[in-house]
Image (cartoon, rainbow, N blue to C red):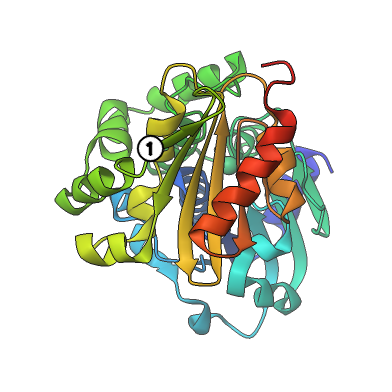
Amino acid sequence: MALVEIGNLIKNSDNFAIVSHTSPDGDSIGSMLGLFSALKEIGKSADMFIDDPLPEKYSFLPGYKEVKNIDDAKDSYSCLIALDCGDLDRLGTCKRLISKADIIINIDHHVSNSLFGTVNIVDDAASSVGEILYQLFKINDLVVSKDTSLCLYTSLLTDTGGFKYSNTTSVTLSIAGDLINTGIDFSEVYNQVFDVKSINQVKLMSRVTSTLETHFSGKIAILILSRDMLDDCNAREDDASDFINIARDIAGVEVAFFVKEVDSTKCRVSLRSRQFVDVRKIAEIFGGGGHIRASGCTISGSVQEVKDIIINELKKVIGVGC
Ligand SMILES: [Mn+2]
């Protein structure tokens, strides 16, 4: 459906629920808070839900504290807007809100999106959901205030890794320019999102990097995060969300993956590639998804077992073209 029709649908609705994926990142949080801010500008009521704690580093964003617990949801919503979710399972427990809403608007940029909405805007050429929302607001003459801009800018900045990933386009940069023109402190956003670390996070980084292993003549780099490390450092899993980049950035590495122990029976895996390997395909084998250079999945097994499973899959693709 076209952006103008979605805009009309939003203008003619009220009582919104906004949801996004588990393990929230800068795009899910930035787009959610940006949409919330834009809806408030036109006098709409909206509740926001994410089925996981929000990383503290985004607490500078307006509306951060207004994200609600799923147990505080109303009995019904006229319109539910899902952001940055390739499929309904990405919503975690927020999935149950689907049956409480009359209309589902699905706004996403994952090519694998299952089109679960009543209406769907899935643009895999967009760097981030924040980029799609900006276009939606502009084309429908909705106000993009300084608060809204701060949130959307955070979406663009984080999903492009600071405007350096190949998903960054001239459209992304032009929108970022428009957002900066509202007067937001964009260097402070960068600082908060990429630079500032807690002492516990730095301690955790030291533990995680000490697990570094490389395989296939240094083309594969692996990091491990165990529950014990989190307990020892008094840290949360999301404190480790950027550590995968340390492995990916080692000279000669084509694929980096990060095995995070959920419990003794399963692990979450994040995958990154540099130039050749489509890591989304690997994540999809295990029911996960993502993008060609960044993906994730959950696999049953111990840390060691899961590590071996991924190495085995990479064995089939590494050396083919790289
Ligand atoms: Mn995204």
**79 over 196 or under it: above or below:** below
> To which quarter of the image does residue 306 belong?
bottom right
Residue 94 found in image quarter: bottom right
- SS at circle 1: helix
Report the quarter where the N terminus lies.
top right
Q: Is residue 108 above or below residue 277?
A: below
Q: Position of residue 158 (x, y in %)?
A: 45, 35
**What percent of the width, then of the height, locates residue 122?**
75, 41
Query: In the image, residue 217 lies at what x, y percent?
Result: 52, 22
Q: Please, what is the three-letter code of the amino acid marked with disc 1?
A: Lys
Q: Residue at x 43, y 38 (%)?
A: 244
**What residue sits 75% from the left and 54% below the top?**
9
Q: Is residue 235 left or right of residue 84?
A: left
Which quadrant of the picture is home to ligand 1? top right
Q: Quadrant of the C terminus?
A: top right
* Residue 277 visible in the current orientation: yes
Q: Nearer the viewer, residue 9 or 55?
A: 55
Q: In the displayed image of the protein, which residue is found farthest to the left?
A: 199
Task: Report the front residue among 117 and 199.
Answer: 199
What residue is drawn where x is 67% and y is 43%? 312
The residue beneath circle 1 is 146
Give the percent coordinates (x, y) of residue 297: 62, 53
Can residue 42 be seen here? The reply is no
Which residue is drawn at the image coordinates 66% and 30% (left, top)?
126
